[in-house]
Amino acid sequence: MATEHILEVENLVVKYGPIWAVNGTSFFVDDREIVSILGANGAGKTSTLKALSGLIARDGKITFLSKNISKTDAHKIPYLGLTLCPERRGIFPDMSVEDNLLMGAYTIRKNKKMIRQNTEKVYGLFERLAERRKQLSGTLSGGEQQMLAIGRALMNEPKLLMLDEPSLGLSPKLVDFIFDSLKAINKSGTAILLVEQNAMVATEISNRIYVMQNGRFALSGNAKEIDFQTLKMKYLGG
Amino acid sequence: MIFQQIIAGIITGALYAIVALGLVIAYKVTGVMNFAYGYMGMISAYIFFTCFSVIGMNYIFAFLISVAFGAFVSYAVERGLLRPVRNISPASMVIITLGLLLLLEGIALQVWGNNYQQIPNLLNGLPLILKFSGGIIVIPQQNLLILGLVTGVIIALILYLNLTFQGKAMRAVAQNEEVSKLMGINSSLMMSISWIISGAIGSLAAVLVAPQTFVYPDMMLSLQIMGFTAAVLGGFESIPGSIIGGISIGVIENLVGTYISTNLKTTFSLAIIVAILLIKPEGLLGSAKARRV
């Protein structure tokens, strides 16, 4: 089978009033790939992911699994197999770990068996969550909350998992753990679109990267071929 | 005597509690403090009066129609008046509910006039009499009905929010609307459902209290104020808090009315509540956690 892009974005534009956050970007993600969008604060990375998940108004053409989703409402997008794990984790603090995961399974709520299986899969991936399944998620540590956010996003078995800054506010050790988990998730067949300020760890696990600057891609290419020092000096502010 | 007053206070408090509950559920999910809440219930009481006393319908049937009507009005208010300005100006949503209060009062005056209309109790049988060594407690059947219905509504609501998938999804929307959409939850539908529940509860409270207050445009004024107070006392975000808040206010009010002064009962109770809030500003069951922006 020819490699077909599972996600294809053409000329994406996001505006906040007169401010252009994303200025006509085009990119794609292939099946089973890990793609990272890197860039400094305010480059337009989060806006890109929010646009893809339908949370904000956007122009341009977004095709996911051969379906045009440029006008699709946010709550319909996870049904298609495209899920965003949001910036700052966005867990539901007044709910238990288990109920948070259950909310991630909202799109498959009729299928109790699948929910049970996926919950066990998530607990297998993040054992810390299994130990705390009855605990209110607002009382979890930052790292555990990030695991919960990722686990929750996996509950409906997305084809493409988008993650916004999963390394934010975590210790280097935890960052390594989270990124190892992402590699494992990818191995089991989920494509990943990652947005990161932590360029080094992201580049390490990615197949391809895009570097964003002022709403445009300044650089893109195979992660193995990018000269990391130039990348850092030139685009990411040292 | 004191037991009698406490029981009476619990009954009044139960009504405050469900008004508080109706306000809180709409507030938690949509973030709007509905100042027209009591007056929306008042319209339902008039609908009940019209169906039962004017048209001559069966009591239960009229009751159900008025509650369904209240639920519909509430849905229409949220969808038609509040939703369009939701993303433009959250503050103006509160002003809209204040405007709605005046509008509903005006409509009631125009349609039904300024007379006090009477509606009968559903249950008029012999009151329940409990005798024991410390004295005697008399509870009218209508009050037992109020207590029963309120308890039923509270239990049903708590079960819905904590045990059903949809109820949990509604709590998810209340905690983080944007993230709930990422889960595939239709947050706009959840908002509508929360207002439908809230409206039905408000109408229920109005129809239950109507035999005591009579039906007139301002009939719900005191219930609305006390409902708000109960919600604030409970922490405004907490459902158990609203219930405890409502019942405490009802009991305090009745005890003050009996042992201190009937004229001062509202003033005194509100003063006590201010004192409680000075000591515990987040409310009895509210959380003091700082909110991140």
Image: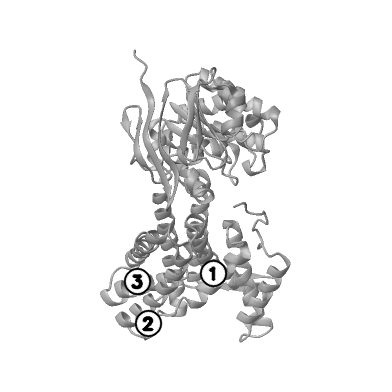
Determine which residue is flagged by label 1. B227
Left or right, B51 with reference to A148: left
Determine which residue is flagged by label 3. B48
Q: Secondary structure at mark 1?
A: helix
The circle on residue B58 is none
Identify which amino acid the numbered label 2 is placed on. Gln
Judge the density around disc 1: few (<14), some (14-19), many (≥20) Cα neighbours within 10 Å.
many
Quadrant location, the N terminus of chain B? bottom right
Identify which amino acid the numbered label 3 is placed on. Phe
User: Of B286 and A90, which appears nearest the observer?
Assistant: A90
The chain that hosts pointer 3 is B
Judge the density around disc 3: few (<14), some (14-19), many (≥20) Cα neighbours within 10 Å.
many
Q: Quadrant of residue B122?
A: bottom left
The chain that hosts pointer 2 is B
The residue at 47%/70% (across/down) is B35
Identify which amino acid the numbered label 1 is placed on. Gly
Residue A82 in the image: x percent, y percent?
Answer: 42, 32
Q: Are marks 3 and 2 in contact (CB under 8 Å)?
A: no
Q: Is residue A19 visible?
A: yes
Q: Earlier in the sequence, mark 1 or mark 3?
A: 3
User: Of B256 and A47, which appears nearest the observer?
Assistant: A47
